Image (cartoon, rainbow, N blue to C red):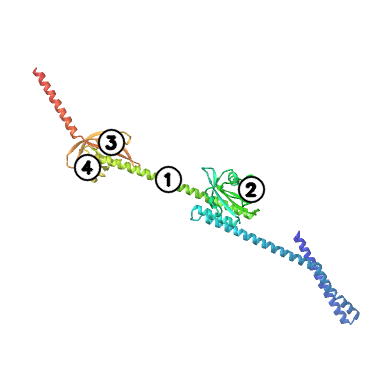
């Protein structure tokens, strides 16, 4: 409708201008006509009408053009003011954007985490034009908020002030997960004084939760204080909200990385302890095996020799390194007879068997084999202890011989009687 009225007004003004021009042309034509005819009366009459043209133009300017021109100037001035206002908003938004960028850069810089939080507090206080900025981190074990950084004010309170969740302005924000804007926070019933943190010089506060929406984790709260009553603009609220969301994710990532580093350190210590225990256990096993009176072989699943002690070297008349990777059962006179040792040992049984061992010098030695399952370094092996029973065999034969002689002697005595 306003555009239609403007078009109608424009058409009306165009018509008046054309009418004045047509009147001027007519009067000029009448003057020329009467001058050519020599009519004095008509000439002077036309000449008298001539001032009506500029008079009509002047009246037309005053009544129609001048108001429109003034309205146009007013509109231009208003437009200029709007442009200036938009430029101010644009500059403010640009400053806020740079503030978010600076905060993200500071929060993710390679500096120590505590120093990064101080940088974030400094930048936030500068962009928000605040007198103080405090960052509290949530301690899940103690269920409270601990002051972790400030923009250089009350640095002695950093790391010492702890506010239980649900108490005070910060505790209320952390418990409710809601922002809080107070023009006079001391007049609010939720305000509580915190030991070690002096807020007597401040009037207004804006407190926001540091909360990760993706997993519902509270990581802390962040607040700015002003020494004069403060009304927050939409741009400041949007900036602070955006900043808190970005900072929350950064803090959670840092906490997770810190927890992961701690777990890695604990895991490395555990592995080192277990490795030392395993090394000590293997060392004790090696000492015991090396100084054992029996020949001990450590076998793989197919019977190949992986380790042999010094007694095994003496028994077989072969160097220990020559025994490695040989098959123990191939050293016996009847290899197939003893291969069941591996199967029975693998099933968890302790096996004992007897046979003959072929020494490297060609001598056949009667031996006794005892096999057990053994786990070393997380792998399963077979330990076979081989004992030379030559003396025992000779004694058994000697006993049998003596028993036979006794029987023969008894038989002769009985027959003589």
Q: Residue at x 8, y 18 (%)?
A: 416
The answer for how far apart the CA atoms under marks 2 and 1 are is: 46 Å
> In this view of the protein, which residue sits in the foreground, 131 or 295?
131
**Residue receiving disc 2:** 186
Height in image: 106 above or below 73? Answer: above
Could you tell me if residue 16 is visible in this image?
no
Sooner in the amino-acid sequence: mark 3 or mark 1 = 1
The structure residue drawn at horizontal position 82% and vertical position 73%, both measured from the top left corner, is 22
Q: How many residues crowd around disc 4 within 10 Å: few (fewer than 14), some, or many (20 or more)?
A: some
Residue labelled with disc 4: 313
Task: Tell me the element at label 4.
Answer: helix
**Is 117 located above or below residue 19 in the figure?**
above
**Mark 4 vs mark 3, CA separation in Å:** 18 Å
Estimate the spatial distance between the alpha carbons at disc 3 and disc 2, rounded to whole Å. Answer: 83 Å
Say which mark, if any, is on residue 371: 3
Q: Given this view, does label 3 or label 2 mark the residue nearer the observer?
A: 2
Query: Distance of mark 3 from mark 1, alpha carbons?
Result: 39 Å
Of callouts 1 and 4, the N-terminal one: 1
Q: Is mark 2 on a helix, strand or loop?
A: helix
């Amino acid at each position: 409708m306003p555009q239609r009225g403007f078009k109608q007004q424009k058409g009306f003004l165009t018509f008046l201008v054309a009418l004045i021009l047509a009147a001027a042309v007519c009067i000029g034509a009448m003057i020329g006509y009467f001058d050519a005819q020599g009519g004095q009366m008509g000439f002077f009459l036309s000449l008298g009408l001539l001032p009506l043209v500029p008079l009509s133009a002047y009246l037309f300017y005053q009544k129609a053009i001048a108001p429109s021109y003034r309205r146009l100037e007013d509109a231009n001035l208003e437009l200029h003011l709007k442009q200036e206002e938009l430029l101010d908003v644009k500059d403010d938004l640009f400053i806020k954007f740079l503030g978010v960028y600076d905060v993200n850069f500071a929060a993710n810089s390679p500096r120590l985490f505590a120093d990064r939080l101080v940088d974030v507090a400094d930048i936030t206080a500068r962009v928000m034009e605040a007198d103080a900025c405090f960052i509290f981190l949530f301690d899940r074990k103690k269920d409270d908020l601990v002051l972790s950084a400030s923009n250089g004010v009350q640095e002695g309170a950093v790391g010492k002030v702890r506010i239980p969740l649900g108490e005070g302005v910060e505790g209320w924000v952390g418990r409710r997960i809601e922002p809080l804007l107070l023009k006079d926070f001391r007049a609010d019933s939720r305000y509580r004084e915190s030991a070690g943190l002096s807020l007597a010089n401040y009037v207004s506060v804006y407190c926001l939760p540091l909360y990760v929406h993706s997993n519902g984790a509270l990581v802390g709260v962040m607040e700015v204080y002003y020494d004069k009553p403060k009304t927050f603009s939409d741009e400041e609220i949007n900036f602070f909200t955006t900043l808190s969301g970005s900072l929350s994710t950064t803090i959670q990532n840092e906490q997770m990385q810190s927890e992961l580093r701690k777990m890695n350190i604990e895991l490395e210590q555990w592995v080192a302890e277990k490795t030392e225990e395993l090394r000590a256990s293997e060392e004790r096993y090696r000492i015991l095996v090396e100084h054992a009176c029996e020949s001990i072989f450590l076998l793989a699943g197919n019977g190949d020799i992986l380790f042999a002690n010094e007694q095994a070297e003496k028994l077989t008349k072969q160097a220990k390194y020559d025994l490695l990777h040989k098959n123990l059962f191939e050293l016996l006179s009847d290899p197939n007879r003893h291969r069941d040792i591996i199967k029975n040992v693998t099933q968890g049984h302790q096996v004992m068997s007897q046979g003959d061992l072929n020494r490297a010098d060609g001598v056949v030695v009667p031996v006794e084999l005892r096999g057990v399952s053994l786990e070393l370094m997380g792998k399963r092996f077979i330990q076979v202890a081989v004992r030379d029973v030559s003396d025992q065999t000779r004694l058994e034969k000697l006993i049998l011989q003596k028993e036979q002689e006794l029987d023969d002697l008894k038989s002769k005595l009985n027959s003589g009687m």
